Image (cartoon, helix red, strand yellow):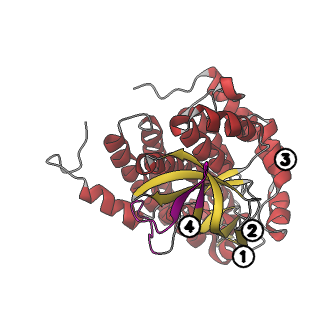
């Protein structure tokens, strides 16, 4: 199988990497974190690069690209531990494009592509944990529209988003809706997250909503799978940079008159970090390439990838802290922030234990071995 990137994909990677290096250095990130963890100006810069429209068709003002281009972008943003939720633009535009009717597409896709509207997925509920088939949110017909009552938790940039894609039960079946944050009976409570980004609890009390699709289970599953692929790519980028920080430190730090990079035991640990990174990279590619597969095959592939990424992110993050010593957990040093970022990613879109259960549950006579 050919894993070489096309010239266009490589140019896209270079453009994003250049933006991260020049416009999103560690100092700027710290200022954003101190201000709350989200900067609309940064999100607009990503939109100016055309990144918010990667999953949007050219007919609706987007770039008409796909999963591989999204993966390339998310790797580079992960390398810079960017807090702004570009992943949400990919998730919501993908699900609207795949499941929305023409009216919904025309109303929202151009706005998402241009960066005018930040639309995020609001699906997490306390009792559901990571299960997608459990939902307490309720929807009811209200004239020509719908009214939603729900409490959604840990909604990315929820108190700054312009609208939410919300799953809710409609006549006993899961459906997907769009709710604008400015609508009546919508309230948010924002807070910082472990990775220093921002999230919110979103409360809807008979809030007006627009129906995306009544096939909510399939649509929500697809949205979360796109999110998992993005998380995997972010994780690869963050681990890559974590490994670089670690090796740079080991080549500078001296013990007994020599750099600690010369100690064989520590070199073995770095080699194990590199192995975990490359395992994660291959599974990230696997997840991305399976996004267009049939649902059952796609679901298994994404869970397998998330298990490996979870194990790799935990290992690389912890080893980096150990090899740095005390400086590895100080707020002034970038490495500690990569560790927190990787820790948060491990729990995003389902933690390792959840996805290990998913893989086990769907094993067949092949015992998990796939051709």
SS of the residue under disc 1: loop
Q: Please, which residue is most extreme toward the left here?
A: 365
- Report x, y in % for residue 315: 48, 64
| Predominant SS along the magenta part | loop
SS of the residue under disc 4: helix
- Report x, y in % for residue 97: 57, 35
- Which residue matches tag 4? 343
| Mark sitting earlier along the chain (2/3) | 3
- Report x, y in % for residue 330: 72, 76
Answer above or below: position of 101 versus 194: above
Closer to the eye: label 2 or 4: 4
SS of the residue under disc 2: loop
Q: CA distance from mark 3 to mark 1?
A: 24 Å
Q: Which mark is residue 333?
A: 2
Q: Residue at x 46, y 62 (%)?
A: 350
Closer to the eye: label 3 or 1: 3
- Which residue matches tag 1? 330
| Mark sitting earlier along the chain (1/4) | 1
- Report x, y in % for residue 95: 54, 42
Query: From where the camera sits, is residue 259 visible?
Result: no
The answer to whether the residue labelled 1 contacts the one labelled 4, judged by CB atoms less than 8 Å apart, is no
**Which stretch did the figure color magenta?**
127-147
Closer to the eye: label 2 or 3: 3
Q: Is residue 145 magenta?
A: yes
Q: CA distance from mark 2 to mark 1?
A: 6 Å
């Amino acid at each position: 199988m050919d894993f070489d990137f096309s010239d266009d994909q490589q140019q896209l990677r270079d453009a994003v990497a250049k933006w991260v290096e020049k416009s999103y250095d560690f100092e700027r990130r710290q200022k954003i974190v101190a201000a709350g963890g989200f900067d609309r100006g940064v999100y607009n810069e990503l939109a100016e690069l055309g990144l918010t429209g990667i999953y949007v068709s050219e007919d609706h003002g987007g770039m008409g690209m796909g999963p591989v281009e999204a993966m390339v972008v998310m790797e580079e943003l992960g390398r810079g531990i960017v807090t702004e939720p570009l992943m949400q633009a990919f998730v919501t535009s993908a699900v609207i494009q795949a499941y929305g009717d023409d009216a919904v597409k025309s109303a929202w896709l151009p706005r998402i592509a241009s960066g005018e509207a930040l639309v995020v997925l609001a699906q997490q509920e306390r009792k559901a944990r990571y299960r997608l088939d459990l939902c307490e949110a309720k929807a009811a017909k209200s004239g020509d529209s719908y009214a939603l009552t729900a409490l959604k938790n840990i909604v990315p940039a929820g108190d700054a988003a312009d609208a939410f894609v919300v799953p809710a039960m409609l006549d006993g079946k899961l459906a997907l809706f769009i709710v604008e944050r400015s609508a009546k009976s919508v309230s948010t409570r924002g807070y910082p997250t472990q990775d220093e980004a921002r999230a919110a609890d979103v409360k809807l009390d008979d809030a007006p909503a627009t129906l995306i699709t009544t096939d909510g289970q399939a649509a929500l599953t697809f949205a979360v799978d796109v999110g998992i692929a993005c998380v995997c790519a972010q994780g690869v980028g963050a681990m890559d940079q974590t490994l670089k920080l670690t090796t740079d430190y080991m080549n500078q730090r001296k013990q007994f008159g020599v750099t600690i990079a010369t100690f064989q035991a520590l070199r073995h640990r770095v080699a194990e970090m590199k192995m975990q990174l490359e395992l994660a990279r291959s599974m990230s590619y696997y997840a991305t390439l399976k996004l267009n597969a049939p649902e059952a095959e796609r679901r298994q592939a994404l869970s397998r990838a998330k298990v490996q990424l979870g194990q790799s992110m935990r290992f690389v993050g912890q080893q980096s802290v150990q090899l740095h010593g005390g400086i590895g957990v100080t707020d002034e040093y970038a490495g500690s922030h990569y560790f927190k970022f990787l820790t948060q990613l491990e729990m995003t879109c389902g933690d390792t234990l959840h996805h290990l259960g998913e893989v086990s549950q769907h094993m067949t006579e092949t015992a998990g071995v796939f051709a």
